[in-house]
Image (cartoon, grey):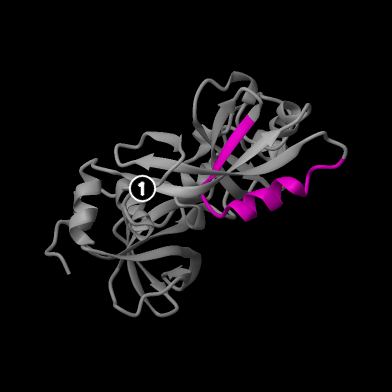
């Protein structure tokens, strides 16, 4: 697996994730416009999109593809979760959510496409460490956070009109957020997910932790005032804060 990860990090190969949601029906454009952070009227090609709650926090994320009869959504998480999220908001809309046996194809050079087969793709368990080291967003690390706190404000089209979470996005436009997404380097083998503290006070949370060829690395959301290079305490171990996407410093030492 380590050799495959090295090749993927060099831009070789593709990852394939089964299940695509087709949003179709007479009201599909207006319905999706009221749900996603992207302006579907300007959609020209595949683009990442977020689905927020009323507090402006990320609930789901997907790659959005235009279609001649509606839109295709390739989830970043589980298809059933994205479908349930959208279904909650269908009231009188003439919209149908159809599961298609297609694959979200994520190429190691960051391109995305849809395909009918995942044959020849890298094993799915390789994707989380690949994404972590490559600087690609993972839903488990960003769920529950504001887009601007996790570096995804670029997936929010300002001025597109009303959508779930839009009021919070409008209020926070141009304002500094108190938390930011950071890289975590575990300094003890017992390090685990959970609350983080610095100098005796709570500052954030470790949200993702994965074994990699370069040691135990992960992602957390911490307060802006905690500097990079600082050591923070978890419930069961310590971490060093690093900028993310990682630079060479994350794996400059001898591999574990």
Compared across the picture, whether 77 is left or right of 235 comes to right
**Foreground pick, 112 / 179:** 112
Q: Position of residue 74 (x, y in %)?
A: 54, 42
The image shows residue 118 at horizontal and vertical percentages of 40, 47
Residue furthest to the right in view is: 92
Q: Is residue 243 visible?
A: no
Q: Is residue 108 magenta?
A: no
Q: Residues within 10 Å of mark 1 (few under 14, many from 20)?
A: few
Q: Is residue 149 above or below residue 217?
A: above
Please name the residue that numbered disc 1 is placed on. Answer: 119
Tell me the quarter of the picture where residue 89 sits.
top right
- The quadrant of the rendering that contains the N terminus is bottom left
What range is drawn magenta here?
71-91
What residue is drawn where x is 65% and y is 45%?
52
**196 shown above or below 18:** below
Screen quadrant of the C terminus:
bottom left
The secondary structure type at the circle numbered 1 is: loop
Q: Position of residue 76 (x, y in %)?
A: 51, 48
> As drawn, is 228 to the left or to the right of 224?
left
Query: How many labels were placed on the picture?
Result: 1
- The residue depicted at 85 percent of the width and 42 percent of the height is 91
- Do we see residue 29 in this rendering? yes
Q: Does 217 sit above or below residue 58?
A: below
Horizontally, is 31 left or right of 57 in the view?
right
């Amino acid at each position: 697996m380590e050799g495959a990860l090295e090749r993927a990090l060099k831009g070789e190969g593709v990852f394939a994730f089964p299940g695509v949601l087709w949003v179709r029906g007479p009201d599909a454009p207006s319905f999706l416009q009221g749900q996603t952070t992207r302006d579907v009227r300007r959609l020209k090609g595949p683009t990442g999109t977020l689905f927020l709650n009323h507090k402006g926090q990320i609930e789901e994320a997907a790659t959005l593809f235009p279609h001649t009869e509606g839109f295709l959504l390739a989830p970043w998480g589980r298809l059933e979760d994205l479908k349930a999220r959208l279904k909650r908001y269908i009231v009188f809309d003439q919209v149908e959510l159809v599961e298609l046996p297609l694959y979200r194809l994520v190429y190691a050079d960051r391109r995305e496409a849809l395909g009918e087969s995942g044959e020849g793709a890298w094993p799915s368990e390789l994707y989380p460490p690949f994404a972590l080291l490559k600087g690609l967003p993972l839903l488990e690390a960003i769920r529950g956070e504001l887009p601007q706190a996790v570096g995804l404000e670029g997936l929010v089209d300002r001025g597109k009109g009303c959508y779930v979470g839009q009021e919070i996005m409008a209020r926070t436009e141009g304002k500094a957020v108190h938390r930011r997404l950071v890289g975590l380097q575990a300094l003890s083998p017992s390090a685990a997910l959970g609350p983080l503290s610095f100098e005796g006070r709570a500052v954030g949370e470790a949200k993702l932790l994965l074994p990699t060829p370069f040691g135990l690395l992960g992602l957390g959301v911490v307060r802006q005032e905690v500097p990079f290079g600082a050591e923070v305490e978890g419930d069961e171990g310590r971490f060093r804060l690093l900028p993310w996407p990682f630079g060479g410093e994350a794996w400059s030492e001898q591999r574990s």
